[in-house]
Image: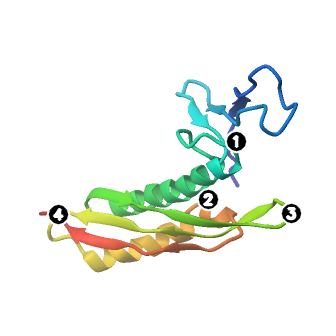
Amino acid sequence: MKQHNYQVRVEWTGNDGQGTKAYNSYRRDHLIQGEGKPAIPGSSDPNFGGDRARYNPEELLVASLSSCHMLWYLHLCAINHIVAVDYRDDASGIMRENEDGSGEFLRVCLKPVVRLRPGADRAKALELHHQAHRLCFIARSVNFPVEVTPEIQAAA
């Protein structure tokens, strides 16, 4: 069995000179970096004092699920001779915050809309979403439901 290792550096950039002296004395800003890649500006959810102009971990989790599903789906289309010409997903997630400040995701909903080359097998294209969901590394790793509601369209 193969193993793959992934490394990123998360560096806090929100120290304005007082460190974490008080809850409101620091910004939640940070950078997510991988060797040779552009940095992703991160923060916490604005509900927790974060900067809404930066990605928060919850958004990145939803994006990881969406991206993983898309990449598997496109792969499956290619090997099954289904020509997708456009793909978008307006994904969303619901997280519950508990009384003690902890929280957990209750579910993530993926809503991929795929446009196919005219004449493509729409039924097969739809079925490939089920396969992609079963194979997605990220969806297989989370402890909450990931719902997939795909839409298949024919390209003009």
Count of labels in the image: 4
Q: Earlier in the sequence, mark 2 or mark 4?
A: 2
Q: Is disc 3 in contact with disc 4, using a CB cutoff of under 8 Å?
A: no
Q: How far separated are the C-alphas under marks 2 and 1?
A: 14 Å
Q: Are marks 2 and 1 in contact (CB under 8 Å)?
A: no
Kind of residue at disc 4: Ala
Measured in 3D between alpha carbons, the distance from the residue under mark 2 to the one under mark 4, in whole angstroms, is 29 Å
Picture quadrant where residue 34 is located: top right
Residue that protrudes farthest toward the bottom in the picture: 123
- Which numbered dot is residue 5? 1
Query: Where's residue 141, x and y in %?
Result: 68, 62
Front one among 101 and 138? 101
Marked residue nearer the N-terminal end (2 or 1): 1
Which quadrant of the view contains residue 142? bottom right
The mark found on residue 155 in the picture is 4
In this rendering, the label closer to the viewer, 2 or 1: 2
Residue picked out by circle 2? 138
Numbered disc in front, either 3 or 1: 3
Give the secondary structure at mark 3. Answer: loop
SS assignment at label 2: loop
Whichever of labels 1 and 4 marks the residue nearer the N terminus, that label is 1
Residue furthest to the left in view is 156
